[in-house]
Image: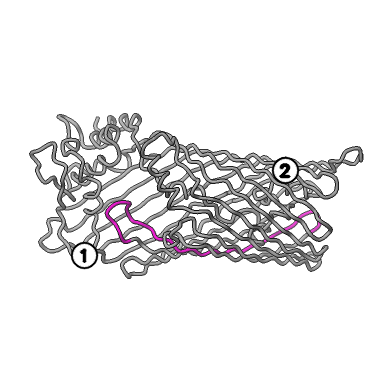
Amino acid sequence: MKRYFSFILLLVCVAASGQNINDVLRYSMEDLQGTARFQGLSGAFGALGGDLSAIGINPAGSAVFINSQFTLSGTNYNRNNDATYFNRLSNQEMNSLELNQLGGVFVFNNTGGNSDWKRVSLAFNYDMAQNFDNEYFASGNANQGLDSYFLGIANGIPFGNLLLQDGEFIEEAYLDIGSSFGFATQQAFLGYFGGLIDPVDANDDNNTQYVSNAQYNSVNQEYFQSTSGYNSKFTVNLAGQYQENLYLGASLNFHTVLYEKFTLFDESGYDAASAIQFATFDNLLRTEGSGFSFNLGAIAKMNENVRLGASYQSPTWYRLTDDTSQRINSDLADADIGFIDFNIVNLFEAYKIKTPSKYTGSLAIIFGKDGLLSFDYSYQDFSEAELRPTSDAAFASENSFISTALQGVSSFRLGGEYRIDRVSLRGGYRYEQSPYADDRIIGELNGYSAGLGYNFGASRLDLAVSRSERDSQENLFEVGFNTPANVNAVNTNVTLGYTLNF
């Protein structure tokens, strides 16, 4: 009966969730993805077109295709993270293999000669805009403990709101408190029944001050974070060639989001006199949702060698839902604390995120059949991102913080290709500014790529290797932990693609 009733409760548990700037950035920042040729040139395709992933930069690019085409791409993602936490360095590496791109373009040439529209293209493409598969591990001897997290949240919350009602099971109370009082009170409940904190006056339901049950000058901590999932983008594109030198296009993009974040936190090494000698606190977040955006673009052929491109990417409007699960334990935890585990799920109300729009200007130089050079410049103002509804007081406060903490971001992509008979040699470089005004939180990104292609005539095989590096500061918990882990992330993608002309 106990487990059954808690399942019914989780179906109706709705609470105000803790979405913040990290959620906005997660869905606003996109990594280099796409076909092997696209990645080989570091995505510098805004004025080139002729590639299915290029329509994600400039939708006019599908009108550059001469004939209909189908492309399939798969990528091995290597994530290598070095985390430094209180002067201790830890490394975590993982690999994942994904089908990251699938699409086709249908080209309709006007052979009648009675229209200024020389060609019309209709394209459909699936791209994995973001692959969330990642892991990092941090450990160190810290002067900030788990009790600091719960004290930072609990102080100010009435003790009476944390108590079990007559005949109420602990997991029922956990869900009910989250539904009735919100996330902060629910965390205070966990801190109290998990044995980390106590009220100053346990006989006063109106008590709002708490003390720690842990004694330490420093504690040994181990933190493991694993994320998985994707942000996929399905694009429907229409483009045309007007007269001889102008290409125009538009795209509709439909996003699907699945994101899971799993964290394990272990703490030990307290003073010998401490009533607590160990504590664990684990969390699981699952996010699902969908989004919509559109693109407009143009490519102008200035002469046989020079092309200019310009494109606009609208904001992406996401509608997302979260569910969370937690578990906690310590020497002083309530005997029934184990009934709060990952089977007890908090469901939250749907919320929305609007990412910032992006503008891209491009230049390409074509050296006949010998090769090409291409350059893209993009600008995206991350301070314009929003959590919605903006009428929500918590969202309004976070949006105000976003507008001051984040900044406009410039990014550069440079790519080149050199052809030797049927073989194409490719390389590229990309740079992206930090979205934060304080670039210590998330640093600048630098990336390099190289690629190789072989044209069989009716088909083509492409291989690309891309590598990017970025530093960031990762807070183990949002409250009470003032010293973050410094993470150096190196991402290496190896992509193999096959293209068939028809």
Look at 80% across and 54% down and name the residue there.
Answer: 301
Occupied quadrant, residue 163: top left
Residues under labels 1 and 2: Cα distance?
60 Å
Residue 348 placed where, x, y %? 38, 35
Residue 457 relative to residue 163: left or right: right
Residue that appears at 36% across and 69% down? 89
Span shown in magenta: 456-483
Q: Secondary structure at mark 2?
A: strand
Q: Quadrant of the N terminus?
A: top left
Q: Amino acid at mark 1?
A: Ser
Quickly name the residue at label 2.
Answer: 249
Residue 455: within the magenta? no
The picture places residue 128, in percent across and down from the top left corner, at 57, 49
| Residue 470 is inside the magenta segment | yes
Q: Secondary structure at mark 1?
A: loop
Going from N to C along the chain, the mark reached first, 1 or 2, is 1
Residue type, mark 2 in image: Gly
Q: Position of residue 153 (x, y in %)?
A: 25, 46
Q: Which residue is mark 1?
A: 218
